[in-house]
Amino acid sequence: MDIRGARALVTGASKGIGKAIAEALVAQGAVVWGTSRNPENYDWPKGVKPLQLDLSSVASIETAWDSQRMESLEFDIVVNNAGSGAFGRFDNFDFEVWENQIDLLLVGPMSLSRLALPGLRKRKGYLVNVSSLAAEFPIPFMSAYNTAKAGLSAFSESLVIESVGSDLKVLDLQLGDFKTDFNYSVVKNIDKNEIGVCAYAVWRRIKRRISTSPTPDAAADKLLRCIQREKRGLIRVGSIFQVRLAPLFSRLIPRNIIRAINISYYVK
């Protein structure tokens, strides 16, 4: 697909992975719109046109789509990227926190996709769902995030199958660790005195790993190369261990051993 002149929508484009994707699309000559719940609060990347969109509410998504006449913008590329996290033992949070995670990370992207797909099919476009390797290798104490990303990957694969024989392209972009400010916005409920696998130790481990991870530009560059080559389906982006070795091990090694390795990755 030729990105130059393409019209793209990137959700959560004010920072992090979404910002990097939006900037990369602009650099390649695309016309880009980026979304945020409160677009007036951010300095947007040059060339990115802000739109207001709250993906945690299906009703608000439909209202924003209609009120901002987003169908008339005729997107060729839609990137479902917006998200946030909650970190803590599953039963230590009010269930509303987990419910909000599922709405924002799974139900919202599915709702936006439903609105965008007719136009994307017509224009032979791209739908990109930004998922996570957590779909296959769950992050301890982020149960709703893991569940939502696994669901989003399953949703993407369903659309890939449904689109066989058509010109619609669907990508499941599964990300490993990247150095963003995502962790700073994570809602946390951490008890240093927990018995067993301790959330506090896991959180410290995650912060250390993120600090030495690749920058979001690497994910954006990989995505654009896949779009230009008209790739479809699952694309993993991250370290060699995350995107090649770990998935290979998961197919060859019993699940209980994989679980032990996953725990070791975050705890030790």
Image (cartoon, rainbow, N blue to C red):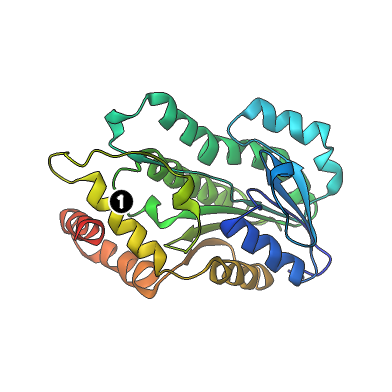
The residue shown at (41%, 31%) is: 98
Which image quarter is the C terminus in? bottom left
Which image quarter: residue 209?
bottom left
Q: Nearer the viewer, residue 218 or 147?
A: 218
Mark 1, residue position? 203
Q: Residue furthest left?
A: 195
Kindly identify the amino acid type of the residue bearing the numbered disc 1: Trp
Which image quarter: residue 110?
top right
The residue shown at (61%, 55%) is: 15
Q: Is residue 88 left or right of residue 228?
A: left
Q: Is residue 138 left or right of residue 109?
A: left
Which image quarter: residue 168?
bottom right
176 up-or-down from 107: above or below: below
- Across and down, in percent, residue 165 comes to 66, 57
- Across and down, in percent, residue 72 comes to 87, 43
- Across and down, in percent, residue 219 comes to 55, 67
89 up-or-down from 236: above or below: above
Which image quarter is the N terminus in? bottom right
The residue shown at (64%, 62%) is: 21
Task: Describe the element under mark 1 as helix, strand or loop.
Answer: helix
94 up-or-down from 268: above or below: above
For disc 1, the neighbor class at 10 Å (few under 14, some 14 to 19, many from 20) is: many
Q: Is residue 251 left or right of residue 102?
A: left
Total labels: the figure holds: 1
The residue shown at (84%, 47%) is: 73
Q: Nearer the viewer, residue 100 or 14?
A: 14
- Across and down, in percent, residue 255 comes to 20, 54
Q: Is residue 265 left or right of residue 177?
A: left
